[in-house]
Image: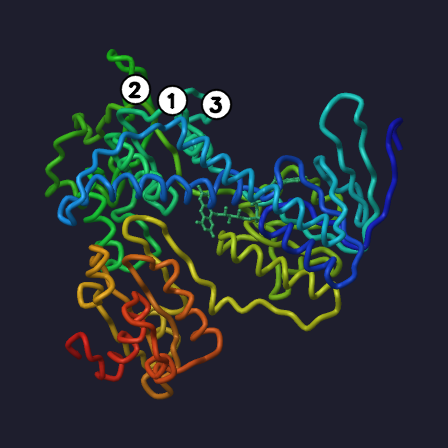
Amino acid sequence: MVVGDVSTGTEVLVIGAGPGGYVAAIRAAQHGLDVTLVERDAYGGACLNRGCIPSKALITATDVAHEADTAEHMGIHADPAIDFERMQSWKSGVVGQLTGGVEKLCKANGVTLLEGTATFVGEQTARVAHEGEGRGSESIKFEHAIIATGSRPIEIPGFSFGDDPVWSSKEALAAETVPDRLVVVGGGYIGMELATVYAKLGSEVTVLEMLDEILLPYEDDVTRVVQSRAEELGIDIRTGEGATGWSNAADGGILVETEPTEDGDEERSGSDTDEGDIGEEGGASYPADRVLVAVGRSPVSDTLDLETAGIETDDRGFIETDERARTDLDHVFAVGDVAGDPMLAHAASAEGIVAAETIAGEPAALDHRAVPAAVFTDPEIATVGLTESDAAEEGFDPVVGEMPFNASGRAVTTGHTDGFVRIVADEETGFVLGGQIVGPEASELIAEVTLAVEMSATVEDVAATIHTHPTLAEAVMEAAENVRDQAIHTLNR
Ligand code: FAD
C-alpha cells in the first residue's frame, strides 16, 4: 500500500455510473447488498452528459423553432430567432437536473459513491485513484464486480479529435456557435440526428457515408422516408465516399477530402455531384467550417488492467458476457456499451438489472428479442424484434400488416404524415414477432409493439385493444388489423 492509501471492502463494486452502472448499483442496493459505485467523470455517463439527453434536448429545441418557422399553412406566422447560447444553457440545465437526480437516487438507495478512476489490481481487488494531487487512492476488496465503463467515439485516420475543426459528438453537442458549413462523416444514427439538428439551426450540412446507404441496420423503405425528409431540409447526403482527411482552405474554413469506396464506385457513374469538387481519381473535397466524425464507438476496456483480474476481451476490446451479463469469471459482470451490441442506454440498464439480480441470487436473464431501438431523426425511426426477412430466415412464416401515417387522423392533425407502422407476425400462430415504425413519435409508439413481442401477444390481442381516438397509437392497432386484412382506415392488401 502506498502512503495515503485507504483500504475498504464491498459486496458489489460497480465501475462506471452511466445507465448501465447506476441502474445496476441501485438495483443491487434494493436487494440489500452493500454497493460501491465508482465514477471518474460525471454521474449519468455518456447518456446523460454527452449522448441521449443533450442530443434529444437540442433535437426538441430545434424542432420547436423549425415547426414555428414552417406553420404558415396553419395560420401561424413566426420568424423565430435562435439564441444558440441560451439554447445551450437550457440544454445544460436539463443535463444538470438529470445527473443531479442520479446522484440523489444512488445516495437515497444507500449506494456508496466514490469519485475516481478504478483499475483492477487483482482478481478481487481494485484501486480507485482520486483525481487531484495528494488525494491518494483507495484499495477496494470486492466479492462481485460489475464493469460498466461504456464507450468512446472512434477516431479515424486523418481526423484527430484534438484538432480544432474536428468534432466528435461531444463537441457537436457542446458547440458555442453554429458553423455555416458542417460536414458529417458517418451516416449512422448519431451522424444523422446531429446533421438534422444543425440543418435546422441553419448550417449547410453534408453527410459523407462510405457505404451505399445511410442508417444501415434499417430496411430500405424505412430509411428512404428519413433520407428524403433530410434532403428536403437541405442536407446533402453523399454515399459511397470515405473521408480521408482535411486541410485548411483559403477562405478560412477547411476542405474535407474523400475517396470513393467500392460501394461508391458502383454508384458514381450515375451521380450528379454538384457540390463536392471531384478530382481526377474520383476523390472529392467538401468545403466546411467544422467536420463531425461519427463513425461508431469503441469500448472503454483498455484502461482497467483487465488482465490483472483475468478478464478477457474480444479483438475489438468488448467484454464477452452470457445471458446473465456474466464474464468468464463467475464473480465479474459487464454491462452496457463495454459488453457490445446493442450499444443503447436502455439495453445497458436492462443488463445492469440482470447483473444485479443475478448477484442477489434472483433468476434473471436477458431477453434480446424485445430490445427496441430508436433514431431521433425527422421523422423518427423505431424498431423491435424481427423484420419480415429476419423472421423468414429464422423459419417463421411471416405475414406483415402496415398502416401509413397519411391515413391516421391524428397524424393529419399534426401535419406529420410521412412514414408508416409495420407489424410482423407469424402467419400460423399470430404471434407478433417485430415491428418497424418510421414517422411521428415512432420512439414512443414502439413501446406497444415491444410489449407485444415481450409477452408473446398475438396480432389479434393488439387489434382487439381499444385505442384512444384520435391518437398516433391507433396506427399500431390498424397495422395489426391489416395483418389479417381487417384494417378499417387503410386498404387491405
Ligand atoms: P456510459 O454511459 O458510457 O457510462 C460509462 C461511465 O463509466 C462513464 O461515466 C465513464 O466516465 C465511467 N468510467 C469509465 N471508465 C472508468 C473507470 N476506470 N473508473 C471509473 N469510471 C469509469 N442510446 C439510446 O438508447 N438512445 C439514444 O437516443 C442515444 N443517443 C445517443 C446520442 C449520442 C450523441 C451518443 C454518443 C450516444 C447515444 N446513445 C443513445 C448511446 C448511449 O449513450 C450509450 O449506449 C449508453 O450511455 C451506454 O451506457 P453505459 O452505462 O454502458 O456507458
Q: Position of residue 102 (x, y in %)?
A: 62, 47
Lower sequence index among marks 1 and 2? 1
- Position of residue 388 relative to residue 442, above or below, is below
Residue drawn 43% across the image and 31% down it: 88
- What whole-number distance in Å separates the C-alpha atoms at marks 1 and 2? 8 Å
Most foreground residue, 73 or 451: 73
Q: From this viewpoint, is residue 236 visible?
A: no
- The image quadrant of residue 211 is top left
Neighbour class for label 1 at 10 Å: few (<14), some, many (≥20)?
A: many
Drawn side of residue 132 relative to residue 236, left or right: right
Q: From this viewpoint, is residue 114 visible?
A: yes
- Which label belongs to residue 165? 1
Q: Quadrant of ligand 1?
A: top right
Drawn side of residue 343 relative to residue 490, left or right: right
Q: Amino acid at mark 1?
A: Pro
Q: Tell me the quarter of the image containing the C terminus.
A: bottom left
- Which label belongs to residue 162? 3
- The image quadrant of residue 201 is top left
Q: Are marks 1 and 2 in contact (CB under 8 Å)?
A: yes
Q: Helix or strand or loop: what does disc 2 sit on?
A: strand
- Which label belongs to residue 254? 2
- What whole-number distance in Å separates the C-alpha atoms at marks 2 and 3? 15 Å
- Position of residue 238 relative to residue 486, above or below, is above
Drawn side of residue 351 relative to residue 9, left or right: left
Q: Are marks 1 and 3 in contact (CB under 8 Å)?
A: no
Q: Helix or strand or loop: what does disc 1 sit on?
A: loop
Q: Position of residue 484 (x, y in %)?
A: 26, 84
Q: Position of residue 291 (x, y in %)?
A: 34, 28
